[in-house]
Image: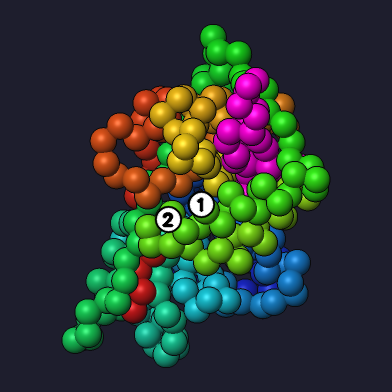
Amino acid sequence: MGKVQTYRDLASFFRNASGFLLGAEFENNLFWEVMQKLQESGKSAWSGNVFHKGEISLSSLILPSGYLLLSKGNKDALIRLAHYGKSKKWKIQGVTGPEKSVLSFASVWLEGVKKAPLDKKEFMIYSTSCFSFLKGRKPTLLNVVEPSSWPRAQAWTTLYANEADPPLESSTLVSMTRSMMLKGNLFLLRKEGVGACAMGGFGRATPRSFVINEVFVPKELRGRGYGKELISGLVGQAAAKGKTDCILFSDYSGPNNLYDRLGFKKIVKFCEQSF
């Protein structure tokens, strides 16, 4: 069922895993952010790859939160990793990753466990090619959020966090938004006669893509197409910064999803399962 190879440090893990992760870049996009944050903080984490016939078939690492992050991988490798974790008596809080990976791992991990899983959050990963999206379109012009505009961005971030279902931790989101601003990756859409009417940006990146975060339009301005214009501008900004694709997560599963209407492609369902 494969061999589990662990690593002494994250740099060694990523040198070995990066090519495999890049093969499913959209599904595995969270790995690049996690690796960057861990390296910046100097924190260590368990990390490992499952090999089959000399090739990586699954990558994973344990996050500071106690959750196990899984890549896209085949079922046998996920079963092998779950048995390995049990043999090492892991004390993990849950698992996150592409839905098929999470379900395959959890089916083994929860064998014989009477208590039902506590919580499960689901998102759809969407993507678009910047070139294809912008073909025949003139991207909307956006304004980079400057420190002088931070009070508005902070207030809108708090509203965004409170409107999420379930609500997000606002202080954590505000911190991330401020980091986006300081990197020049937070933008406002302004309209004549209206002023600032939408906000969004890039929270993380993979080698070829930006991940679009915090697409927000105030309630009183919704239904006027500002969200669509904002997305167009963000894709244009990604292309200008040398990225070939944009990725985003959406937890809205109802009809009339903005990203479906804009032609974004559904990639995979991503989920977080607590134990």
Residue at x-position 60% and y-position 39%: 199
Question: What is the spatial separation of the Cα atoms under label 1 and label 2, in whole angstroms?
Answer: 6 Å
Which picture quadrant has residue 34? bottom right
Give the labeled residue for mark 2: 164
Residue at x-position 55% and y-position 46%: 214
* Residue lying furthest top: 136
- Magenta region includes residue 138: no
Q: In this view, does 157 lie to the left or right of 219?
A: right
Q: Do the residues labelled 1 and 2 touch (CB within 8 Å)?
A: yes
Q: Please, what secondary structure does the residue beneath circle 2 have?
A: loop
Q: Which quadrant would the C terminus be assigned to in this image?
A: bottom left
Q: Where is residue 28 in the image (x, y as percent from the top left)?
A: 50, 52
Q: Is residue 213 left or right of residue 94?
A: right
Q: What stretch is highlighted in magenta?
A: 183-209
Crowd around label 2: few <14 · some 14–19 · many ≥20 (10 Å): few
Task: Give the camera-side residue of 70 and 134.
Answer: 134
Q: Please, what secondary structure does the residue beneath circle 1 have?
A: helix
Q: Position of residue 243 (x, y in %)?
A: 65, 33
Give the labeled residue for mark 1: 160
Q: Where is residue 17 in the image (x, y as percent from the top left)?
A: 58, 58
- Magenta region includes residue 204: yes
Is any atom of residue 74 visible in this view? no
Which picture quadrant has residue 95? bottom left
Q: Say if 3 sits above or below 185 in the image.
A: below
